Image (cartoon, rainbow, N blue to C red):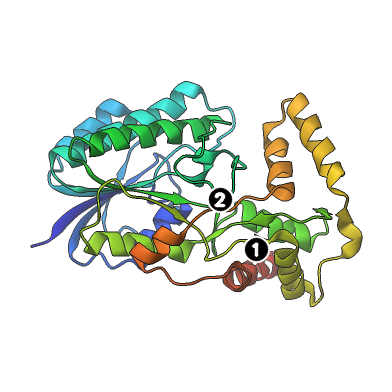
């Protein structure tokens, strides 16, 4: 007998990879995607599942969708993430209220609930390294604030019987994603970036780790209430990573003339904070301060593959190079 599963955020980078690469042969799959999602983002999904357009901010419609789907395991990936000009109310509806409705539905139906949060609950840069569950949560933007509140709701429902696990991915990379790692590659390629003389340790997550984690959680009886930080096996020096990227692109190490004293980043960080430019303030933090996480529990419990960023990033660089070549023709 087939099981039912509902996946939110299926048209996003992580959600799409999970749907495309996991074997859902034994499931009746429902995918929730944002209204007006482009056909390109849905390529290859329609033959695997029923696709429903739903704005997670529309709580009444979400309740209606859930009412028609009993005994449904849920993988909740969808969220509003650092979208410019998005109100606090929208973050609350999509990232907090919708999460609560999904968690309630799973609890009432004694179903699995796999929730994708973020290591951002510890702030852009954690106050202690690596952070643990005693480390203070830092709501330094609306997205992080919403994830902190959503986690608290889930932890409360776990005490009432919700069978849930929380996954906190670090900044994720892989072919098809245009986030921080892609922009790092692009800026290095175009010599648009300078690095600090004392390079920080950073911790990225290969998307294949998240696919592996979900696969393991779906086929096993996990311990409700567990929280897993997921990232590559070890953090990497930003300069070492820049050397790998530059070597793959230009067959030489990163240009040492583009390395500047750390105080330059400190000044820039203070200035961008003073003028209220949150985007660039965040970027200067990510490029000048260390951020890494304790991932031991995830590797032990979920049997994740050992992926080192300097190796894992190479396929993303190749994807970037192919995209660059296609634009020339």
Q: How many marks?
A: 2
The numbered dot on residue 236 is 1
Q: Which residue is mark 2?
A: 130
- Secondary structure at badge 2 equals loop
Residue shown at 64%/58% (left/top)? 182
The residues tagged by marks 2 and 1 sit, at their Cα atoms, a distance apart of 14 Å
Crowding at mark 2 (Cα within 10 Å: few <14, some 14-19, many 20+): few
Q: Which of 78/155 is in front?
A: 155
The numbered dot on residue 79 is none
Q: State which mark lies toward you, 2 or 1.
A: 2
Residue 20 showing in the rendered view: no
Contact (Cβ within 8 Å) of mark 2 with mark 1 = no
Residue 283, image quadrant: top right
Place of residue 269 in the rendered image (x, y in percent of width and height, measured from the top left): 77, 36
Tell me the quarter of the image containing the C terminus.
Answer: bottom right
Nearer-N-terminus badge (2/1): 2
Q: Which residue appears farthest toward the bottom when viewing the image?
A: 251
């Amino acid at each position: 007998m087939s099981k039912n599963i509902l996946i939110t955020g299926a048209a996003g980078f992580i959600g799409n990879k999970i749907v495309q690469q996991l074997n859902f042969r034994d499931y009746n799959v429902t995918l929730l995607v944002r209204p007006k999602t482009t056909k390109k983002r849905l390529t290859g999904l329609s033959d695997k599942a029923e696709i429903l357009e739903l704005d997670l901010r529309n709580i009444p419609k979400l309740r209606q969708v859930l009412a028609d789907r009993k005994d449904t395991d849920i993988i909740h990936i969808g969220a509003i993430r650092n979208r410019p000009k998005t109100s606090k109310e929208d973050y609350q509806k999509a990232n907090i209220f919708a999460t609560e409705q999904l968690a309630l539905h799973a609890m009432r139906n004694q179903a699995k609930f796999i929730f994708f949060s973020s290591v951002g609950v510890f702030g852009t840069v954690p106050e202690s390294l690596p952070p643990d569950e005693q480390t203070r949560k830092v709501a330094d933007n609306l997205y992080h604030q919403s994830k902190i509140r959503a986690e608290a709701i889930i932890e409360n429902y776990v005490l009432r019987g919700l069978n849930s696990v929380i996954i906190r991915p670090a900044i994720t990379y892989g072919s098809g994603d245009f986030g921080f790692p892609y922009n790092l590659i692009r800026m290095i390629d175009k010599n648009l970036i300078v690095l600090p003389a004392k390079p920080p340790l950073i911790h990225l997550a290969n998307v294949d780790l998240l696919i592996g984690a979900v696969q393991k959680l779906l086929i096993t009886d996990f311990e409700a209430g567990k929280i897993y930080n997921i990232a590559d096996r070890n953090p990497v020096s930003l300069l070492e990573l820049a050397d790998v990227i530059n070597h793959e692109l230009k067959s030489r190490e990163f240009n040492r003339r583009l390395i500047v004293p750390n105080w330059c980043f400190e000044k820039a960080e203070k200035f961008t904070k003073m003028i209220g430019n949150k985007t660039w303030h965040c970027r200067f933090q990510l490029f000048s301060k260390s951020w890494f996480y304790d991932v031991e529990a995830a590797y032990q419990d979920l049997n994740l593959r050992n992926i080192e960023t300097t190796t894992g990033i190479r396929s993303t660089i190749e994807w970037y190079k192919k995209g660059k070549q296609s634009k020339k023709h």
